[in-house]
Image (spheres, helix red, strand yellow):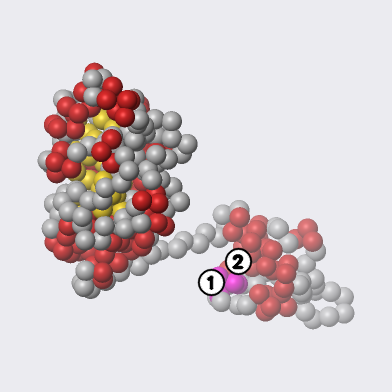
């Protein structure tokens, strides 16, 4: 039983004297209040009555105890089924080579909680001297580029799509690839073109030596890191050259290959000039890895998977359960 802090008795009464203001943040007083509240289960009103102070004063003392680290509160998420089992179920359901799950529900901006799953996916690629890695644009891949990734000396990075002069950083593919290369010690080859260049620029691009090198890297790439776009009609962020109004039927995209719910790739004005890795090159990448989370991307991911757009998936547990539920499995 914890002893209550002793206070000198007042001249005519039997109860404790009121705590002086200077006493309220005394270490012993704070410790006593914290133990009464968190360990003995006393209410703030009861503590206030014992110390002869106001209830708001007790509340402030408890807040101060937390701020100074005297009281530390941890929120631990229960393992609702466990990542390995859930990953295996999703992997089998989608017919993929591997699924990497982050705990719980994560942000589409790829916060720290996504890093362990992303790292496992990159490490499994076993990239080494002479290998190539294709990198797309998008908010998820932009976040990955700023993570602490493994060193990749001798690896060549190639943009999967064009993206020069985009107003939003996550659609500037060259900058995403450059950032990843600097942080991993790898090399990279840029694409000096927008997502949909003019006919004249597109024709000139075909003779560009740098673009020729990118196309060679596309064909021999060992791995890829790609985002999956959500349904086009609900998106607030899209490459500026893409005619959004012409893609009402789009359920999502991978590397600017837009598709409908039935898994049919969609054409749009300028699609014949879109700078993007060809579908056949995507399909031939052994460690093609898509990264996406969120309820709005459930059918985007499922449809892209059925189209063979990727072989490996990085997502979170919440999205995994929604996908299994959508496919009729146990969520």
> Which quadrant holds residue 36?
bottom right
Give how far across and how far down residue 45 sits, in percent. 69, 78
Label 2 environment density (alpha carbons within 10 Å; few <14, some 14–19, many ≥20): many
Viewer-side residue, 318 vs 66: 318
Residue 103 badge: none
In the picture shown, does residue 267 fall above or below 320?
above
In the picture shown, does residue 92 fall above or below 38?
above
Q: Main secondary structure of the magenta part?
A: helix
- The earlier-in-sequence mark between 1 and 2 is 2
Disc 1 element = loop
Quadrant of the snapshot with the N terminus: bottom right
Disc 2 element = helix
Residue 39 badge: 1
Give how far across and how far down residue 220 sits, in percent. 13, 31
Q: Which residue is painted at 72% across and 73% down in the image?
A: 55
Give how far across and how far down residue 74 sits, in percent. 46, 61
Residue for badge 2:
34
Q: Which residue is painted at 26% across and 65% down in the image?
A: 323
Q: Is residue 231 magenta?
A: no
Q: Which residue is painted at 61% across and 55% down in the image?
A: 67
Quadrant of the snapshot with the C terminus: bottom left
Answer with left or right where residue 311 lies relative to residue 320: left
Q: Which residue is painted at 25% across and 61% down in the image?
A: 261
Stretch of the chain drawn in magenta:
36-40
In the picture shown, does residue 168 fall above or below 96?
above
In the picture shown, does residue 104 fall above or below 15?
above
Viewer-side residue, 294 vs 150: 294
Label 1 environment density (alpha carbons within 10 Å; few <14, some 14–19, many ≥20): few
Instruction: Check whether the beta carbons of the residues at disc 1 and disc 2 lie within 8 A of each other.
Output: yes
Residue lying furthest right = 12
């Amino acid at each position: 039983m914890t002893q209550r802090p002793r206070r000198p008795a007042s001249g005519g009464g039997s109860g404790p004297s009121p705590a002086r203001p200077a006493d309220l943040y005394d270490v012993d007083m704070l410790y006593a209040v914290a133990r009464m509240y968190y360990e003995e289960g006393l209410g703030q009103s009861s503590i206030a009555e014992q110390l002869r102070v106001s209830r708001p004063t007790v509340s402030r003392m408890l807040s101060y105890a937390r701020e100074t680290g005297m009281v530390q509160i941890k929120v631990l998420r229960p393992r609702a089924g466990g990542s390995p089992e859930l990953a295996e179920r999703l992997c089998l359901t989608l017919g993929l080579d591997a699924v990497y799950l982050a705990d719980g529900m994560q942000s589409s901006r790829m916060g720290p909680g996504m890093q362990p799953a992303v790292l496992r996916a990159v490490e499994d690629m076993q990239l080494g001297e002479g290998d190539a890695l294709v990198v797309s644009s998008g908010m998820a891949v932009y976040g990955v580029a700023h993570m602490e990734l493994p060193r990749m000396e001798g690896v060549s990075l190639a943009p999967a799509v064009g993206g020069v002069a985009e107003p939003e950083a996550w659609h500037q593919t060259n900058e995403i690839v450059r950032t990843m290369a600097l942080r991993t010690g790898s090399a990279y080859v840029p694409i000096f073109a927008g997502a949909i260049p003019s006919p004249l620029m597109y024709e000139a691009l075909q003779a560009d030596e740098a673009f020729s090198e990118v196309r060679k890297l596309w064909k021999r790439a060992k791995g890829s890191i790609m985002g999956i776009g959500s349904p086009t009609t609900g998106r607030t962020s899209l490459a500026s050259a893409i005619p959004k109004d012409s893609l009402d039927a789009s359920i999502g995209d991978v590397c600017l290959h837009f598709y409908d719910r039935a898994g049919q790739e969609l054409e749009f004005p300028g699609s014949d000039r879109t700078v993007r890795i060809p579908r056949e090159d995507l399909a031939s990448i052994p460690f093609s890895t898509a990264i996406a989370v969120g309820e709005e991307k459930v059918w985007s991911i499922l449809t892209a998977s059925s189209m063979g757009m990727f072989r490996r998936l990085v997502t979170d547990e919440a999205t995994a359960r929604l996908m299994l539920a959508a496919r009729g499995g146990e969520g």
